[in-house]
C-alpha cells in the first residue's frame, strides 16, 4: 500500500489515479497511523513552498514525515514535494523546509526563457538511479515549476536543462524526489511510479 500525504496540496487525485494504473493500492491520508504503517509514502505538491510548509505544520505532519525516514519507509516527493525535502527555498525566505536533505531551492533565473518552466524535457541520468533502472530509453518527462534545486547538489541523480542545469531527481537511501510530474509523464512516468511501488520498507 502506498500512502499519499493529504495536506491540501493539490494533484492528489492524479497521483492516486496513476498508482491505480500501475496496480498499486493507494490511500490518501493525513492520519499518522496510516502513513507510518504504509509500505511507502508519496509527498505530492502543487503551489508555494511557504504555504505548503504551513499546512504540513498545521496538520502535525512534519514530525510524522521525519519519522517515516527514521523508520526506513520509502518516501517520494513530487514537484513541490521534492523541494520541501530540502532546507529552504528562495520562494519563502525564513521558512524552514523538512530538512531531510541538505541544500536550498532557488528561483529559475531569467535567461530569455519563460518562467515557470512548463513542458516536456529530457533527463540526463547520473549513476545508477533507482527510480530509472527499468527504463530502456531516454526519460522525457513533464515539468511545471518556477523554482529548482541546483544540479550540483550531491544527491541529484537526474538533470535537465532550462537555462541552467536543474536537479530533476534526487535520491538518498530511501528518500527520493522528482521535480517533474511522473503522474503526468505518460509511459515513462508510469514506469517510474511502478518502480517506486516495488520498493519495500526496510524492516528494522
Image: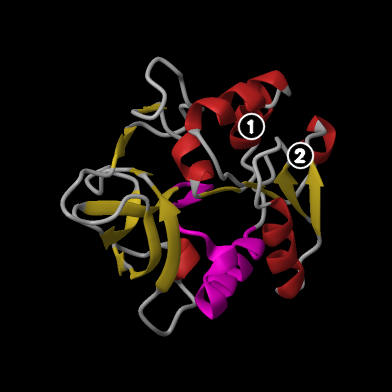
Image quadrant where residue 186 sits? bottom right
Residue placed at 46% from the left, 79% from the top? Answer: 135
Tally of marks: 2
Q: Which residue is mark 2?
A: 35
Q: Position of residue 1 (x, y in %)?
A: 79, 56
The reply, left or right, for residue 99 in relation to residue 191 is left
Indicate whether residue 76 is drawn in magenta: no
Q: Which residue is mark 1?
A: 65
Residue placed at 65% from the left, 65% from the top? Answer: 198
Indicate which disc, 1 or 2, sits on the residue closer to the N terminus.
Answer: 2
Image quadrant where residue 15 sits? bottom right
**What span is in magenta?**
172-199
Q: Are marks 1 and 2 in contact (CB under 8 Å)?
A: yes
Looking at the image, residue 113 lies above or below residue 24: above
Residue placed at 61% from the left, 41% from the top? Answer: 72
Residue placed at 74% from the left, 59% from the top? Answer: 16
The reply, left or right, for residue 151 in relation to residue 137 is left
Relative depth, front residue between 107 and 98 = 107
Residue 192 appears in view: no
Q: Position of residue 63 (x, y in %)?
A: 65, 22
Q: Given the current orientation, which residue lies at the most extreme left position? A: 111
Label 1 to label 2: alpha-carbon separation: 8 Å
The reply, left or right, for residue 183 in relation to residue 125 is right
Label 2 secondary element: helix
Q: Position of residue 104 (x, y in %)?
A: 33, 31
Amino acid at each position: 500500500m502506498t500512502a499519499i500525504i493529504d495536506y491540501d496540496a493539490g494533484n492528489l487525485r492524479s497521483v492516486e489515479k496513476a498508482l491505480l494504473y500501475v496496480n498499486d493500492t493507494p490511500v490518501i491520508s493525513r492520519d499518522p497511523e496510516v502513513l507510518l504503517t504504509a509500505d511507502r509514502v508519496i509527498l505530492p505538491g502543487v503551489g508555494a513552498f511557504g504555504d505548503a510548509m504551513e499546512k504540513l505544520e498545521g496538520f502535525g505532519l512534519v514530525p510524522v514525515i521525519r519519522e517515516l525516514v527514521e523508520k526506513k519507509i520509502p518516501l517520494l516527493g513530487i514537484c513541490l514535494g521534492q523541494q520541501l525535502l530540502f532546507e529552504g527555498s528562495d520562494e519563502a525566505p525564513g521558512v524552514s523546509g523538512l530538512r531531510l536533505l541538505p541544500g536550498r531551492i532557488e528561483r529559475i533565473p531569467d535567461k530569455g526563457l519563460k518562467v515557470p518552466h512548463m513542458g516536456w524535457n529530457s533527463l540526463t541520468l547520473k549513476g545508477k538511479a533507482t527510480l530509472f533502472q527499468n527504463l530502456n530509453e531516454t526519460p522525457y518527462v513533464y515539468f511545471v515549476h518556477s523554482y529548482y534545486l541546483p544540479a550540483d547538489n550531491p544527491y541529484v541523480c537526474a538533470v535537465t536543462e532550462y537555462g541552467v542545469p536543474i536537479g530533476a531527481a534526487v535520491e538518498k537511501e530511501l528518500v527520493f524526489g522528482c521535480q517533474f510530474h511522473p503522474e503526468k509523464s505518460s509511459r515513462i512516468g508510469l514506469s517510474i511510479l511502478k518502480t517506486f511501488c516495488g520498493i519495500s520498507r526496510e524492516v528494522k
